[in-house]
Image (tube, rainbow, N blue to C red):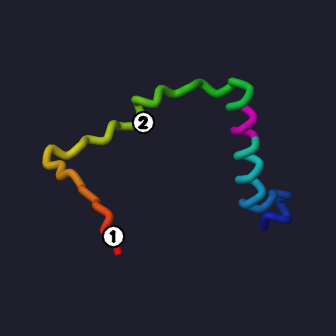
Amino acid sequence: MLKSMKIPPLQERRKANRLIFFFKVVEGLVPAMPSQDFLTPVRQSKRRIPLNISKTSK
């Protein structure tokens, strides 16, 4: 059915879309998204136990 409609395979369409998006990012055509909207800081545990590693001589 794809051949009769002259539609390229999904893999080729995805590759083309990735390249188009990359071009838009490089050229500044895609609005920048603030990282704080998508990335959350990692909470550190209050029960932090220090790890002491000592070398033993043989």
Give, as a single range, the part of the protein colored magenta.
Answer: 20-24
- Residue bearing the label numbered 2: 38
In percent of the image, x 24 and y 55: which residue is there?
Answer: 51
- For badge 2, the amino acid type reads Phe
Residue 30 part of the magenta-drawn span: no
Quarter of the image with the N terminus is bottom right
User: x%, y% of residue 31?
Assistant: 59, 24
Q: For this rendering, which residue is in front, 28 or 14? A: 28
Q: Is residue 54 above or below residue 41?
A: below
How many numbered badges does the structure rendering display?
2
Q: Earlier in the sequence, mark 1 or mark 2?
A: 2
Q: Which mark is residue 17?
A: none
Q: Most extreme residue toward the bottom, as rendered? A: 58
Crowd around label 1: few <14 · some 14–19 · many ≥20 (10 Å): few
- Dot 2: element: loop
Crowd around label 2: few <14 · some 14–19 · many ≥20 (10 Å): few
- Residue bearing the label numbered 1: 57
Q: How far apart, in angstroms, are the residues tagged by discs 1 and 2?
A: 48 Å
